[in-house]
Image (cartoon, helix red, strand yellow):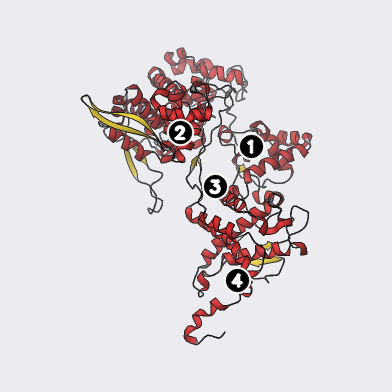
Amino acid sequence: MKMPHELSFLNAFFVEPTSKLQRADWLKSSFHDDIWHYNFDYKHDKTLDWNVNLEDGSTLTDRKNIDLLTGLKYMLTSATEKAAGGGADSNSIKSQAINFARAIHVIDYLLLHSAEYKLSTYGLAGLSSNNLKSILTTLTYHSNSSESVYGWRERMSSYCLSLLESTDQNLISQTLAAIPEMRVVTPDQEDENELNVEPHLIPSIRAALYLKGYYRKGNQRWNSPNSAMLSEVIYKKTLKGKSETKSVINILTYYKSASDFRREHPPVRVTTGERKTITPTAFNGYKASIYSMGRLHELGIPAPPVSDLIEVLKFQANLSSLGSFRTLPSAVVFGAFKDSVEFHLKHGKTIVNGFCKLILYCKIHKIKVGELSDKELQHVVGPELAALGVRQFGLSFRNEDSLPGRIRIESKESYFNKLRTNCAVLELIGVYIGAVQLVVGAITARRVGELLDLHCTNCLDSTEQWLNFYNRKSTYRLYGLRNLEARPIEPIAVQMIKNLIRMQKILVRLGYVENMSHLFATPSIRGDIGFSQPTSYSYNRNLDFLCDYIQTPINNKGERYYIRQHQLRRFFAMLFFHSASFGGLETLQWMLGHTDIEHLWNYIIETLDGTILRGAKAQFVAESLHQGGAESYTQLAHLLRERYGTDDFALVDTEELEEHILDLIQEGEVCIEPEFFVDNAGKHLRVIVKIKD
């Protein structure tokens, strides 16, 4: 029907749907081609190859799969269809590209799981409302499509184990001998192990990947496998996944100058972040992509029932960010905090003085520290440090029985025995800096990046009662600039900080370093002149030195609790709850400069995000129940009794109990909050657990 000119804007509504959806501004090929070329203002066209194998061995482009193929193609073109069939400016090319990418993700997910959905047999019409809601839920699981759509880490784990099994072990041994740095799995890599693979297998897996040519060639300091090359193999049955790069898997990266520092025991596994779900906008975008299958009914193409698609349209997923890091038992942190303070009070000044004497002696005599004999070094550091046990500069350096400049390899048992008997100056400095990091980190609850930014010249204010730091979460609309903030800090932490500042001032005067540096800069573990600038690796290495030195507890698997700053942030909130329980709030108020406990709580909720607070609440109540405090939380105990079938929560694993309570909090079934009240003795609080009816 031909519209009059004044009604021409209605023409778009009368175009036959099949004809309309077989064209798109971005599609440079014919709709019926098996290989599509497309362009969303890219420099060069990109390609989609529809020749994908399905679960029955057929190809998507085979004649028997024509309805499935056509339906998937229409899903892509309808995803970028102009709003309400409106004019040329009804949606931008950028919006079209985003909607196209989401539709591709849905299609790739279906193709990856074609066996589960029996796509070659039933096509899109075989997808039920439960299937569609399950897909939508999975796509919300992670903000990174490498994980939510492609299950990158899980599939890489399976591929790596399969490759390891099929690779000649002699060739693996030869590769590791030729590239020894492949053998080094750093403590941080162990902590953040993204693969479902035991760390001791990682060197062999690296060698197997190297033999297949997956590592980039070059002279860079580090080397990671090429995710695009791996995707070609792992994601053959996808449209886009086989050509997209994926997120870096850090544990497969090896460093050409890796430190040989190791930990005494395997670590209790932790992760360093949280599982971040997608945004509501992205969730609605994926929902729209799935709901758009309804257009296929209009085109005469088999599709899921309309009633099922309406169910999907009404479906809402939980988009809250779920914590994924392990909890440290509060007793572990309390014990480490106490040991760190005692270590400072007993030995802090002696260690700094002895190190500075050593640098002064070498400066006067114009020799390198590593050239001193052990006997000479003991004389130089002074009687106090020698009496403490110091015998050499570093545990990896020569002694007077070695050839000059030759490195002595310590056995693991010998190394950690000497570490705890204060044998080496370098490691002792690392232990001490680790103790300062732990105390400052626990009391301030700052992010590790904010602590790394602390500088000796300005981290304390003129009164020495406030810590100055740059807030790492304050850059919104500030072009990357961060707010300088000040927070009260407890005197013992100030004392420890000042001792590190004093050390740097002396070393600047001696010419060991040119200028004052960051607070947690550490003398190079290799003994080079100067300080290594603080990094998360050196920061965590110092904490590891401390944990092995004070011997933090070991669990029943033989794993040691190696403390990390993100765990100490939760401890900060735990300290509030424990202080309330044990009547020690006055100390915490004094430490943080607050005279009112309600003001103190407000300070805590401003400092920590909701995920950390929820975790702290769940941990506190779980530990209270585990230790026989069920009478304080009778309603919660009754609720948990239905799950565990017992009133004796000492029989239940604390971590499992905590995770269940955290689930109840996130589902809104349980609310844990401090309740403030006033009596004749002043303002007090108690921790209240409220159960939803």
Foreground: disc 4 or disc 2: 4
Locate the C terminus and report the quarter of the image it occupies. top left
Give the CA separation, mark 2 to mark 1. Answer: 24 Å
Label 1 environment density (alpha carbons within 10 Å; few <14, some 14–19, many ≥20): few
Marks 2 and 3, how far apart at CA: 23 Å
Which residue does the numbered mark 2 point to in the structure image? 565
Residue located beneath label 1 in the image? 196
Mark closest to the chain's N terminus, 3 or 1: 3
Residue plotted at (51% across, 55% down): 314
Tell me the kind of residue under disc 1: Asn
Residue 500 location (% of width, % of height):
39, 28
- Name the kind of residue labelled 3 in the image: His
Check contact, mark 2 vs mark 3: CB within 8 A: no
The answer to whether 17 is drawn above or below residue 178 in the figure is below
Mark number, residue 142: 3
Q: Which residue is mark 4?
A: 24
Is residue 368 at least partly visible in the picture?
A: no
The answer to whether residue 399 is left or right of residue 158 is left
* Disc on the earlier residue, 4 or 1: 4
The mark closer to the camera, 3 or 1, is 3
Total tally of numbered discs in the picture: 4
Residue 635 drawn at (x, y percent): 41, 30
Determine whether 264 is above or below 667 in the image. above
